[in-house]
Image (cartoon, rainbow, N blue to C red):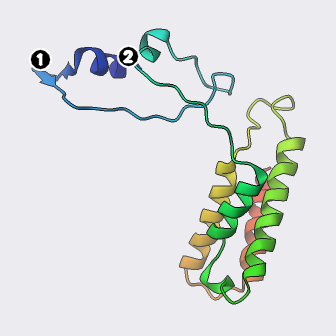
Amino acid sequence: ICLLRQLLELKGFYRKDRFWVKLEKIKFVASCSPPTYVGRKQLMGKFLKHAFVFYIDYPSNECLCKIFTTLNTLPQLKKDHSLSEKMTNIMIELYYFAKEIFTTDVCAHYIFTPRDLTLWVQGIIELTRLKINLSIQDIVEALFLRRSFCF
């Protein structure tokens, strides 16, 4: 954070050979978790005075369904769009279940976000890219078992 602050305030930095490198027209965009999350620290006011801070909440259940139904529309599922919807509904239901049962009160690192759903979808996409001759049922079972053991 100190380096970012220096870049914003002084518009540059010194290289190892003590030559000043001037920066122009730079912007920093960041995504931060709250300082209440495990391993996170409060950002200093001296740094934040240079930043616009926006709070964007997680998407609603309806938005999650739309987003992940679209992402789950694999070539294998194009024949039956209802499979994509069913798979998404199960994923989101399991996500909310895990979020409700495994709270930070139980263990500090139990933090579930829509990112977990995204990782799940990425796993499905990766399995289909491997071009292994797996049925949709095999793919879904493998991923549900794998992710559910992570909870």
Q: Distance between the residues labelled 2 and 1?
A: 18 Å
Question: Residue 146 lies in what quarter of the image?
Answer: bottom right
Residue wearing tag 2? 2
> Looking at the figure, which quarter contains the N terminus?
top left
Q: Residue at x 52, y 35 (%)?
A: 31
Residue wearing tag 1? 18
The residue nearer to you, when weighing 109 against 49, is: 49
Q: Which residue is drawn at 55% across and 30% down?
A: 54
Q: What element carries label 1?
A: loop
Residue kind at label 2, given as amino acid type: Cys
The numbered disc on residue 150 is none
* Residue 66 position (above or below residue 116): below
Question: How many labels were placed on the picture?
Answer: 2
Q: Is mark 2 on a helix, strand or loop?
A: helix
Residue kind at label 1, given as amino acid type: Arg
Left or right of 19? Residue 61 is right
Question: Residue 140 lies in what quarter of the image?
Answer: bottom right
Left or right of 143? Residue 124 is left
Q: Which residue is drawn at 19% across and 29% down?
A: 24
Left or right of 105? Residue 54 is left
